[in-house]
Image (cartoon, rainbow, N blue to C red):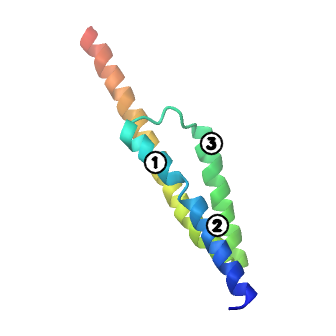
């Protein structure tokens, strides 16, 4: 095995580990049905940074970073969509509660 192959494995491994870091946050959010502690600003900046990273890796053909970045942006998208869903359903519940008190 040449040194380039070792570096490829290091790249894939590090990218995979960084990508799956979002899984515990997604699990906790789904389990608790709350995303109040997750900032939209953080999510948008993170998503935008990942998008730029994917474009750069694609243009430079850096596959060991590109593949995990795609996984990471997928997980980030799931978290954003679920937070939007929870926020909208909570607003509807609050309105229903307010109307039922009238």
Label 1 sits on residue: 26
Q: Position of residue 101 (x, y in %)?
A: 27, 9
Label 3 sits on residue: 42
Q: Nearer the viewer, mark 2 or mark 3?
A: 2
Between 63 and 80, the one lying in front of the other is 63
Q: Quadrant of residue 92?
A: top left
Q: In this view, does 21 lie above or below 63?
A: above
Label 2 sits on residue: 14
**Closer to the N terminus: mark 2 or mark 3?**
2
Q: Nearer the viewer, mark 1 or mark 3?
A: 1
The answer to whether mark 2 and mark 3 are in CB contact below 8 A is: no
Q: Quadrant of residue 63?
A: bottom right
Q: What element carries label 1?
A: helix
Residue shown at 58% from the left, 37% from the top? 39
Q: Position of residue 34 (x, y in %)?
A: 42, 34
Q: How crowded is mark 1: few (under 14 residues within 10 Å), some or many (20 or more)?
A: some
Residue shown at 62% from the left, 66% from the top? 15
């Amino acid at each position: 095995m040449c040194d380039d192959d070792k570096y490829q494995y290091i790249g894939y491994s590090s990218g995979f580990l960084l990508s799956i870091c979002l899984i515990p946050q997604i699990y906790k959010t789904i389990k608790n049905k709350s995303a109040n502690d997750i900032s939209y600003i953080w999510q948008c900046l993170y998503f935008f940074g990942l998008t730029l990273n994917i474009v750069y890796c694609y243009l430079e053909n850096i596959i060991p970073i590109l593949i995990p970045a795609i996984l990471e942006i997928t997980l980030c998208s799931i978290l954003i969509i679920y937070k939007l869903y929870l926020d909208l359903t909570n607003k509807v519940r609050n309105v229903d509660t307010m109307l039922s008190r009238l």
